[in-house]
Amino acid sequence: MKLRSIVIFIVLGFLSTVIYYVNYKLLVVSLVWSGIIALLHYFMERTSRISLFRTIFFAILAFSFLMEMHIFFNQENSFLPYCHIGMAGNVLNIGYNEFLAIKNQTFLRYGALSIGIAWLLIILINGGGFCSYGCFFGGIDDTFSQLLRKPLIRISSSTKFREFQFALLIFLIAISFIYSYSVFCQWLCPLKLSCSIINENSRTYMFQVYLFIGIGLVFLVMLPFLAKKRFFCSVICPFGALPPLVHKFTPYKITIDKSSCSKCGKCSEVCPSFAIVKSPKTSIPHITRFCTLCMRCASKCPTKSIKQTLYNRKETSLIPFISIMLGGAVSLFYLPNAIIDLINFLCSLKI
C-alpha cells in the first residue's frame, strides 16, 4: 500500500518538475498536490473507503478547474482546454485536419493527433475510470450527486439513458462534420460561459448564454442533486459514450461475485452512472459496460460481493492506483495555476 502511494508521488513529482521547472511557485504547489494525491491513495488502500477518498479527490479537481477557467472571477484571461469531450464529438473534422497536416508534412507540429492518441490510450488502460477520477465535468455532477443521503427523485437504473448517449455521439459527429465545427462546444457545453462566444449584442449570443446556463444547471447540478445520478456524464457527454465501446478490451473491471450476492439491489440503487441492472431471470445485479469504476456500489454492498478484477477473473486492487495517477497527471496541467489564482484572489481581498 505504501509502496504504491510512493510510486504515485514519484511519478507525479517527476511530471511536475518537467512541466514547471522554470516556475518555482507552480512547481512547489504541484509537488504539494502530488503529495496530497499520494496521501489520498494511501487512505483509499488503508481504510478500503475508496469511494469516499475518490470523491474528495474528484471534487477538488472539479472546483480547481472551474477556478482556472475563471468561472468565479473574470473571463478575460480564461483559456480553452484541448478538451476530450469536444474532441469526441468532432472526431471527423480532427481526422480530416490531421490528413491535411500529414499530406503537407506538418503533422509533427499539430497537437490533436498526439492528444487524441493519449485519450485513446487512457480509455484502453482505464476504461471509464477517467470519468470518475479525471474529468472536470464529471467531478461537478459527481459531487452534487452525493450531497443528499437519499434521492428526492427516484429513477430506475436503466441503460436506456446510456444507449441514448450513443445516438447523440453519432449525431454530433455527423452534424459537426457537415458544418465543419464542433457543435457540442458551440451549443451544448456549459464551459463556453467562460469564453468569448459570439457578438455580445446579437440574439444568438443571449440564446447561447441561456442555453449553456440551462444545461449546466439541469444536467450538472439539479438532476444529480435530486436523483443522485450523474446525468451530464451519462446522457449528453459525447466522451462518455467511448469507454463502453471498448469495454471488452479494457483490463480492469468491477464485477459481482454471484455466489455471495444477497440480491438486495443496493448496488443498482446507488450506481450514479446507470451501469448496474438486475437480471430478469436471477435478480442478481449485473455491472454493464457503462461502469465508470467509481466503486460507490462496493461501499454499499452488505456482503462485500463487489470486487476489482483483471479481465473479470483475477482479483486485483490496482484500479484506484491507476485511476488516481492518471487523473492526477491530467490535473497537474491546471490545478497548480488554479491554486495560485485562488491565493492571489484571497490576498487581494480587503478585510
Image (cartoon, rainbow, N blue to C red):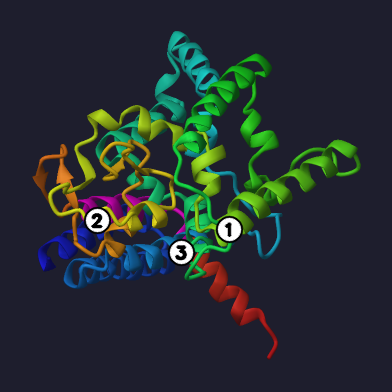
Of circles 1 and 3, the one toward us is 1
Q: Nearer the viewer, residue 237 or 322?
A: 237
Q: Is residue 141 above or below residue 204?
A: below
Q: Position of residue 294 (x, y in %)?
A: 34, 54
Q: Determine which of the numbered discs, if any, sits on residue 234 in the image.
A: none
Instruction: Report the residue that reaches farthest toward the bottom.
Output: 351
> Residue type at mark 1?
Ile
Pointer 1 residue: 153
The local crowd at label 2, few if under 14, some if 14 to 19, many if 20 or more residues have their Cα within 10 Å, is: many
Residue 334 located within the stretch drawn in magenta: yes
So how many labels did they put on this image? Answer: 3
Residue 344 located within the stretch drawn in magenta: no
Residue visible at 23% across and 43% down?
253
Q: Nearer the viewer, residue 194 or 337?
A: 194
* Numbered disc 3: secondary structure: helix
Alpha carbon distance from label 3 to label 2 = 16 Å
- Quarter of the image for residue 73 reads bottom right
The local crowd at label 1, few if under 14, some if 14 to 19, many if 20 or more residues have their Cα within 10 Å, is: few
> Residue type at mark 3?
Ala
- Quarter of the image for residue 90 reads top right
Pointer 2 residue: 320
Residue 90 visible to the viewer: no
- Which one is earlier in the sequence, the residue at label 2 or at label 1? 1
Of circles 2 and 1, the one toward us is 1
Q: Is residue 339 above or below residue 189?
A: below
> Residue type at mark 2?
Pro
Magenta span:
319-335
* Numbered disc 1: secondary structure: loop
Q: Main secondary structure of the magenta part?
A: helix
Residue visible at 47% across and 70% down?
149
